[in-house]
Image (cartoon, rainbow, N blue to C red):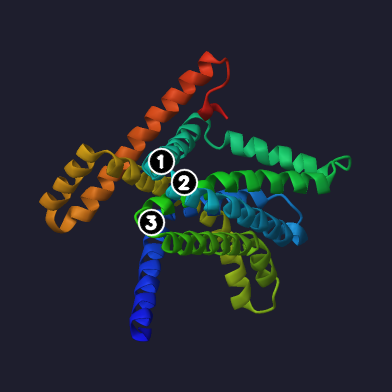
Amino acid sequence: MTKMAARKSAAVADDVAVLTKVSAQKTAGVLGDDLALNAQQVTGVSAHREIPVVWAVAKGSLLNKAILVPAALAISAFAPWAVTPLLMVGGAFLCFEGFEKVAHKFLHGDDDAAAKHEALEQALADPTVDLAQLEKDKIKGAVRTDFILSAEIIAITLGTVAGQDFWTQLAVLVGIALIMTVGVYGLVGGIVKLDDLGLYLSRQASSAAQAIGRGILWLAPWLMKFLSVAGTAAMFLVGGGIIAHGIAPLHHLIQDWRAAAGGAGWLVEMLANAVAGIVTGAVVVAVVTLFNKLRGKPSAAAH
């Protein structure tokens, strides 16, 4: 019995490890956007307050997931029929966010970002502005954003483990929640400190250190841009993949294309998922824009 129990425990542990890995891969789109978005949210605070702010947002993120994980388990236990619709909603929301970002970029370019940066600089230079309150507002905004992104992560993970027993679901959901929180905010902390590291190295006596410092200072803004672009692309891939998988005829068609493409099948499937994501995003943005116009509000892409 002891050997059988040990084998069973090992099998469960293997299942948890595999499912956690699969869930991490599926949530990669949210992770990329989460990194860029949270790094941008933290910018603008004093250098010595950046890490405390990141830590405060990380604690808020853990609280978000402490709410979302039990909610996901309750849905799986009492309303398992709702898992697929929730997953489809999460996929559609990913596509919506991705298309909204692309539309906003084409409609407004860098003007909106420059205006926001200038407004932040003016606020920081104004002695009448309460910097402590400004910091609290930033933290609250980042935690609200994190709740949406965390909900997407948990929804995607729940779809991966929907057919598993309760304890496997619990282990994978908690594992993903912790891995994503530590991973995202550990990297965000490193990203926001890149400028400080580059500046420190550029002031050293060693010419090699100075060259590395200048390289880091040059790299930092490009890294943020790369994360933003990669995160947006991954949103279409992950969201489109979820939508395509949830629509049986489309899923079977894409699988037929993959089989016909042979060795390049993975690329065909990826491109098909991306197209499905872009089309879904465009449709949702159009519906939201029309709804907002009927209510007399500005369109989503106008913000």
Q: Among all residues in the image, which is located at the extreme front?
A: 1
CA–CA distance in space, label 3 to label 2: 12 Å
Amino acid type for the residue under numbered disc 1: Ala
Mark 1 = which residue?
82
Q: Residue at x 14, y 46 (%)?
A: 256
Amino acid type for the residue under numbered disc 2: Ile
Which quadrant of the rendered structure holds the N terminus? bottom left
> Can you give x and y, in whole percent of width and height, for residue 132 in the image?
82, 49
Q: Among all residues in the image, which is located at the extreme bottom?
A: 3
Helix, strand or loop status at disc 1: helix
> Can you give x and y, in whole percent of width and height, for residue 4 in the image?
33, 81
Helix, strand or loop status at disc 3: helix
**Does residue 48 appear in this view?**
yes
Left or right: 2 with respect to 171? left
> Can you give x and y, in whole percent of width and height, for residue 183 in the image?
54, 63
Q: Residue at x 59, y 77 (%)?
A: 208
Amino acid type for the residue under numbered disc 3: Val
Q: Nearer the viewer, residue 82 or 45?
A: 82
Q: Residue at x 76, y 47 (%)?
A: 136
